[in-house]
């Protein structure tokens, strides 16, 4: 009975549950919410709620790991190792991250969101472990990578060897798509993906005649794609041509 009292007496001791611990949880809440809000605005599978819960939960696990076992600290034969809980957090977050990654038509998606969940877990652990400045720095790194890097890659999108997307709208039943693919190949581009949009009547009064369709070609090449766009502009039956940087499939 004395052993039970020895363990139970400090359970509601305010030490380890003071202003510092609540502040650390609050910082984790704020930082993880910022990352979650950015993901929510990008309409990703894991948004504001998921990232916030991951960040706050990781911080709470760290608080429990550091302050939650004071009652058994003085017992003979009992060893305290706060790093054990931290290691389990790192292992457990993999289940959430793995559930966000999926493959569709040889394209892997969700990698960036899974990595963001992993980072949010780490910043929550940093806040719970008494390192809020590191957590804030990790949050800044997130916005630098996710928001800043795409700007850099877009500016470099037309350098030789880069990947681009060719957006076309054309009149069907003229064999244009086959000629377009042949032209891309002749110009030294490799077509990695073809996405065709549903056909629509060119004119509401013309049923059964020429229709309009859209196609997105993902191209890889060693030279600029502007000459390709310029040539297609003069083709009969081509309604519109657009070119932009290849969209990252790992988001």
Image (cartoon, rainbow, N blue to C red):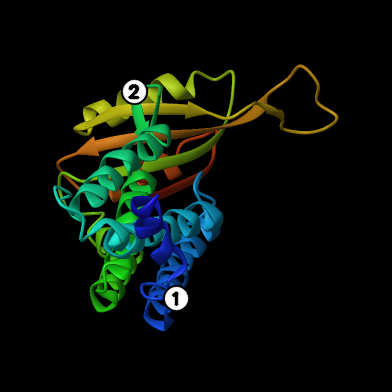
Name the spot of residue 176 as percent of width and height, x first. Answer: 47, 24
Q: Residue furthest bottom?
A: 19
Q: Is residue 132 above or below residue 200?
A: below
Considering depth in this image, is 180 or 110 the residue closer to the camera? 110
Q: Secondary structure at mark 1?
A: helix
Q: Report the residue at 39% width, 47% height from top.
A: 113
Name the spot of residue 231 as percent of width and height, x first. Answer: 36, 42
User: Which numbered disc flags the more N-terminal residue, 2 or 1?
Assistant: 1
Name the spot of residue 161 as percent of width and height, x first. Answer: 15, 44
Q: How many marks?
A: 2
Q: Secondary structure at mark 2?
A: loop
Name the spot of residue 185 as percent of width and height, x first. Answer: 25, 26
Q: Report the residue at 78% width, 33% height from top.
A: 203
Residue marked by disc 2 = 106
Q: Report the residue at 53% width, 58% height from top.
A: 48
Q: Kindly report the distance in space between the C-alpha atoms of the residues bearing marks 2 and 1.
A: 46 Å
Q: Report the residue at 59% width, 23% height from top.
A: 172
Instruction: Note whether residue 144 is visible.
Output: no
Q: Please tell me the numbered disc located at residue 22.
A: 1
User: In the picture, which quadrant includes the C terminus?
Assistant: top left
């Amino acid at each position: 009975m004395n052993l039970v009292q020895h363990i139970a007496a400090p359970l509601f001791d305010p030490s380890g549950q003071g202003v510092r611990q609540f502040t650390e949880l609050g910082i984790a809440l704020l930082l993880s919410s910022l990352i979650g809000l950015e993901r929510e605005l990008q309409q990703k599978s894991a948004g504001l709620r998921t990232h916030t819960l991951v960040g706050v939960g990781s911080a709470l696990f760290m608080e429990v790991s550091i302050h939650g076992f004071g009652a058994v600290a003085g017992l003979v034969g009992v060893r305290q190792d706060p790093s054990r809980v931290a290691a389990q957090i790192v292992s457990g977050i993999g289940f959430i991250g793995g559930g966000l990654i999926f493959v569709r038509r040889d394209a892997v998606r969700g990698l960036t969101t899974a990595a963001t969940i992993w980072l949010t877990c780490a910043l929550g652990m940093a806040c719970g472990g008494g390192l809020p400045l590191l957590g804030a720095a990790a949050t800044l790194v997130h916005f630098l990578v996710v928001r800043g890097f795409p700007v850099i890659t877009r500016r470099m999108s037309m350098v030789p060897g880069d990947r681009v997307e060719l957006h076309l709208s054309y009149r069907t039943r003229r064999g244009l798509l086959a000629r377009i693919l042949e032209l891309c190949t002749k110009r030294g581009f490799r077509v990695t993906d073809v996405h065709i949009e549903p056909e629509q009547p060119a004119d509401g009064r013309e049923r059964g005649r020429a229709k309009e369709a859209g196609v997105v070609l993902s191209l890889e090449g060693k030279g600029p794609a502007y000459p390709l766009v310029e040539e297609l502009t003069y083709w009969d039956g081509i309604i519109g041509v657009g070119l932009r940087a290849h969209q990252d499939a790992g988001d």
